[in-house]
């Protein structure tokens, strides 16, 4: 067999696939290729990239979960118990196609606006009661 890389260690001497050879053993005069220049024609329409990115994000979105009456009653009971006995709470809620989780302390429940007010690290947050999917 012909030795391709005479200055390289034994494991790389007979290798012909440059992707498997460590860069320090490759010939420094070997052309590097066009790099980013090869992809530059595809970057001429930035709106297209934004739309493709949005399509990828939209694929991960889900529909709002529909809770049964039993599940809603359990959420209500848990919320009332937490409000009077242990104000620290972890809430999962639906927002913009995703299920989000947040932890905090119950400030109040606004029955007029149907909102739960929570204190968390960044401040006071309002969550609609109809968007809540789980309470821990």
Image (cartoon, rainbow, N blue to C red):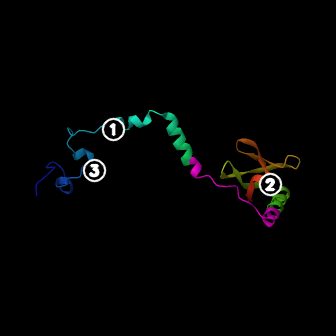
Task: Name, please, the residue furthest toward the left.
Answer: 2
- Count how many numbered circles sit on residues in the image: 3
Packing grade of label 3 (10 A; few <14, some 14-19, many >=20) is: few
Res 85 → quadrant: bottom right
Q: Considering the numbered disc 3 on the image, is that residue within a helix, a strand or a loop? A: helix
> Crowding at label 1, few (<14), some or many (≥20) Cα neighbours within 10 Å?
few
- In the rendered image, residue 97, in percent from the top left (x then y), is placed at 66, 50
Q: CA distance from mark 3 to mark 2?
A: 58 Å
For the record, the magenta segment spans: 57-74
Q: Which residue is mark 1?
A: 35
Instruction: Confirm whether residue 46 shows in the render.
Output: yes
Does the magenta-highlighted stretch encompass residue 73?
A: yes
Residue 131, given in percent of the width and then of the height, sits at: 75, 52
Mark 3–mark 1 distance (CA, rounded to whole Å): 15 Å
Residue 9 percent coordinates (x, y) = 19, 53
Query: Which residue is the site of mark 2?
Result: 87
Left or right relative to 19: residue 47: right
Look at 78% across and 64% down and name the residue there.
Answer: 68
Looking at the rendered image, the quarter that the N terminus falls into is bottom left
Between discs 2 and 1, the one toward the N terminus:
1
Q: Residue at x 18, y 56 (%)?
A: 10
Viewer-proximal residue among 123 and 69? 69
Residue indicated by mark 3: 19
Check disc 2 and report its element: helix, strand or loop: loop
The answer to whether residue 68 is magenta is yes
Residue at 86% across / 57% down in the picture?
84
Spot occupied by residue 27 in the image (x, y as percentages of width and height): 19, 42
Furthest residue toward right: 112
107 or 125, which lies in front? 125
Q: CA distance from mark 2 to mark 1?
A: 56 Å
């Amino acid at each position: 067999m012909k030795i391709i890389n005479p200055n390289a260690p034994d494991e790389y001497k007979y290798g012909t696939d440059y992707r498997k050879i460590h860069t320090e053993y490759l010939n420094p005069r070997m052309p590097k290729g066009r790099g980013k220049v090869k992809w530059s024609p595809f970057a001429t329409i930035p709106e297209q990239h934004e739309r493709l990115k949005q399509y990828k994000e939209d694929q991960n979105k889900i529909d709002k979960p529909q809770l049964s009456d039993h599940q809603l009653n359990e959420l209500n009971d848990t919320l009332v118990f937490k409000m009077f006995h242990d104000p620290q709470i972890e809430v999962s809620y639906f927002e913009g196609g995703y299920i989000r989780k947040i932890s905090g302390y119950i400030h109040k429940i606004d029955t007029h606006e149907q909102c739960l007010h929570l204190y968390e690290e960044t401040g006071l947050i309002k969550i609609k009661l109809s968007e809540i999917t789980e309470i821990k």
